[in-house]
Image (tube, coloured by chain):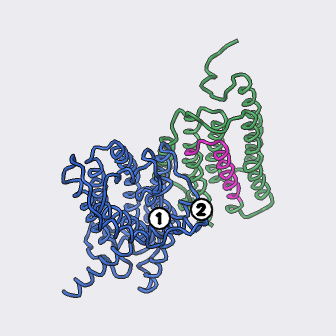
Chain colours: A blue, B green
Amino acid sequence: MIMTIVQILLRLALWLTLAPLLPGIINKVKAWVAGRRGPPVLQLYYDLARLWQKGVVLSTLVSPGFVAGPAVVWIALLCATQLLPLGPVGATLSFRGDVLLLIYLLALARFCTAWAAMETGSAFEGMGSAREVSYAVLSEAALITAILTLSVHTGSITLVTMLEPSAGAGAVLLGAGLFTVLLAENCRVPFDDPNTHLELTMIHEAMILDHSGPPLAAILHGASMKLLLFALLLTEAVLPVGELPPLGASAALAGGVLAVTVGVGLVESFLARLAFKRVPMLLTTGFLLCLFALLVAWKGGAS
Amino acid sequence: MNSSLNLLIGLAMGLNLVALGSGRLPSVIRAVAFQGMALGLMPILMEHSNWLVVTVSLGTIAIKGFVIPFLLRRAMRAANIERESEPFIGFVPSLLLGAGGTIAAVAFSRALPLLPEHAGLLLVPGALASVLTGFIMLIGRAKAILQVCGYLILENGIYLFGLLLIHATPLLVEAGILLDLTVGIFVIGIIVDRIQRAFDSLDTRKLTVLRE
């Protein structure tokens, strides 16, 4: 019993402490490509610590939802991460159909971000929420198709068994599709520019303009956990993690996540943000990549 | 052998979607050229290579991969247009239509009574998907050069279907089709130039009015 609790705590600690590393690596890669020194890899940790010590500025208009929203987002994302298996050590919580819970937790997190953003009645935040939600329609479709692919391929709806083998012949298609979803869901270039300073072009950043102090820290930390979650999902979907010996699987996971992170950094260095009207095109492409992976899984399984 | 053939057909099906989703003329022309080259390789993989098969294959690759794109690019430069601005069917809807058509083609071809040696091949779905893509481009695009590209993809689909009968039809027929195609594109290149001079635009919507 105590061993289980210790294990769960260790897992939580691992997710909580490792997640803010990813944005740091991305920024380092971008700085390296641009020939700058760049911020330290641990910059987000400093930012989070600083934000945690600050006070909260509350508008007189807002309801308690303004603070509750980020808290729900953070908890929903943390719960979602606990469903994802960490290679050989498995997931904290695993049951038949947990993949549906994962999708709904991500949707809940998105809903609460949009809700908290619209609390202050700022026009920019309403605009950001509208964009976030309308792009989510397409990226969620792609994510669900990707998960359907894995489910058809393995004949299971439990995340632990679904992510064990590689996605077979359609792995390249599925990987490309999931990478597009990762970029869109985490508001990276070419869908959104995390470094933008112009409210009119922001998506995610526009939604958190009025947050401050610990709630902002929760949002930033939640976003980094979401990035790690998607990077891990992509790695485990493409690599046959479950068929390797435990040590090799851990190395493969770490290497895969690192490769995805560096890939995001490279994409951000070499691509510009797309015009808004061309974003649906790219998201549709991601959706179609996942759809064709599904086709390969279905066709390959039958013949 | 089957897996490399299927890879080539899969590539051709992917290029269908690239051609459907892109509005820039050079990238559509490049996609059609690559598709033609991928299809040109296939007879060498399917047949025991005698000199006739190799000659016709190399001819297909040269004409579909280099000559026709060259003619199209020249027509494009003469007409001075780079991209499709407002198609009849938007890029996202046509992409979705094409993907739906591809999936329907795969599903449909499973129900067809094919010869056992063709059952594991993607030839029939690839052919049907290419024909559908060609039709979508012919219907959905307003610029004459893109309609020509649609016609080329349609022809590629028919060619794929013809590969099913590679043992029965003499390859001279293929060579004849290839010659027709080249002449057709050559003529279309001249017509495009004429349309551009007469109407100051390649938009086929403007060609509906008769005048002296």
A204 in relation to B117, above or below:
above
Q: Position of residue B141 (x, y in %)?
A: 58, 35
- Which of the chains bears the disc numbered 1? A
Q: Choose top left, top right, bottom left or bottom right for residue A294.
A: bottom left
Q: Position of residue B30 (x, y in %)?
A: 67, 49
Q: Choose top left, top right, bottom left or bottom right for residue A271.
A: bottom right
Q: Position of residue B132 (x, y in %)?
A: 54, 43
Q: Which residues are magenta?
A: B20-43
Q: Which mark is residue B7?
A: 2
Whether residue A100 can be seen here = no
Q: Is residue B142 left or right of residue A104?
A: right
Question: Main structural element of the magenta stretch: helix, strand or loop?
Answer: helix
Whether residue A202 can be seen here = yes
Depth order, front residue of B178/A90: A90
Assign the N terminus of chain A to one quadrant of the image: bottom left
- Give the residue displayed 27% in from the left and 47% down from the top: A120
At label 1, the amino acid type is Gly
At label 2, the amino acid type is Leu
Tell me the distance, in whole angstroms, between the alpha carbons under discs 1 and 2: 13 Å
The reply to whether the magenta stretch includes residue A161 is no
Q: Which mark is residue A300?
A: 1
Depth order, front residue of B45/B8: B8
Dot 2: what SS? helix
Q: Are marks 1 and 2 on the same chain?
A: no
Q: Is residue A37 left or right of residue A207?
A: right
Depth order, front residue of B124/A72: A72
Q: Which mark is residue A81?
A: none
Q: Position of residue A12 (x, y in %)?
A: 29, 76
Depth order, front residue of B159/B70: B70
Q: Is residue A70 left or right of residue A19?
A: left
B167 in relation to B90, above or below:
below
